[in-house]
Image (cartoon, grey):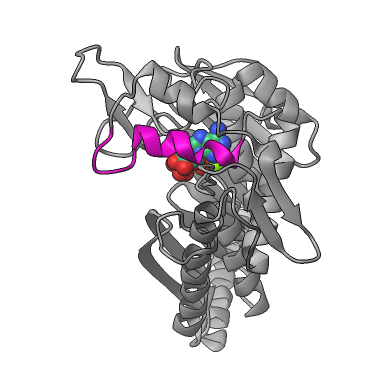
Amino acid sequence: MKRYRQICALVIAIFLLGAILQGCARATGVREYHKDIFALNTWVNIRIYAGKNGPDILDKAIKRIEEIENRMSVTIQGSDVSRINSNAGKQPVKVHDDTFAVIKKALEYAEKSNGAFDITIYPIVKLWGITSEHPRVPTESEIQDKLELVDYRNVVIDEEEKTVYLKEPGMGIDLGAIAKGYAADEVARILKKEGVVHALINMGGNVVVMGGKPNGQPWRIGVQDPRAEGARRHIAVIEVMDGSVVSSGDYERYIVDVYKKTGKRYHHIFDPSTGYPANSGLMATTVVAPYSIDADALSTTVFIMGAERGLEIVEEMEGVDALAITLDKKIYTSKGLKGKLIVTDKEYELQQ
Ligand code: ADP
Ligand code: MG
């Protein structure tokens, strides 16, 4: 009988708590708002919990993303990046603070990775055209020709003047591996300023979460199956309250060489030491970090450097973690993820 009363009391308590929480939500008028747009070459989805001004907050966030895209896109005429590239070997170009900050950060990662991460990879990116209408496998001599133009040490930045100069004619930069991270951080900053506590921002696998879910649970971010054709499915889950989770891999944008019938996969992340798609034994990487700009740059970097050297760099950084998935479906993680990564697919083997 006593037990029955205890259970009744518990049920009533849970019911009351639910009613109170619902009442709070109604009183404050907080509800979910979301928006999907195509920007920075990918689908962007922003989900926030906010009051009546939710749609206005979303509009501000979207405007900011478009502003960043207009400054950093390599294909938009008149963008800072386009102007830097067309003035290669000619003169320094004054850029917006946004662009300057991203280029500066990119050069830091180039140093840190000994040139594995290198935004001057653009001539190689253009040559292969993996993400263009006409991708192709170039000849060895074409590759060697363009490789001569790839060297982050030939990017000269002037902190006072906020200018960027590419020393050699023909050089070019591409911020595709880092700009989404910056944009996601900027969206999070705007949302916070507008008083949003709980939010999830997803820019094509470049995720930022804020404040856990409204029910107090952490956000659960899926690590995509790098070999799922068509439908998206995840192979692991990472739980995060605040911060960014970014993935890179050979599965996002690639071509299969049907022309020479080798069936080889050529993807869009290049190794600056060879001029070919990076071939470090990985098919995907995921990085967890407080800021998305770091997670974005690092997911690309680890993918190029491979599990061993890539995870070494990650271990050196405070509050940053990563996982690397090898071509034979083994998952390696940094120390901070040990015991935390939830693997949901038996085909993938977590290495302890
Ligand atoms: P995604 O764009 O699929 O999210 P990444 O963040 O890994 O993936 O960025 C890939 C893009 O980065 C490529 O499309 C290209 O523009 C650029 N890139 C390719 N190789 C390098 C490299 N070694 N260093 C810096 N940027 C690179
Ligand atoms: Mg990246």
Q: Note whether residue 247 is visible.
A: no
Q: In which quadrant is the C terminus drawn? A: top right
Q: Position of residue 157 (x, y in %)?
A: 73, 53
In this rendered view, identify the residue nearer to me: 176 or 128. Answer: 128
At 51% from the left and 49% from the top, the residue drawn is 206
At 21% from the left and 14% from the top, the residue drawn is 260
Left or right for 76, reference 280:
left
Q: Note whether residue 295 is visible.
A: yes
At 52% from the left and 52% from the top, the residue drawn is 85
Residue range of the region highlighted in magenta in the rendering = 118-135
Left or right for 139, reference 134:
right
At 47% from the left and 26% from the top, the residue drawn is 145
Q: Position of residue 292 (x, y in %)?
A: 62, 51
Q: Is residue 186 magenta?
A: no
Residue extending farthest to the front is 90
In this rendered view, identify the residue nearer to me: 123 or 65. Answer: 123
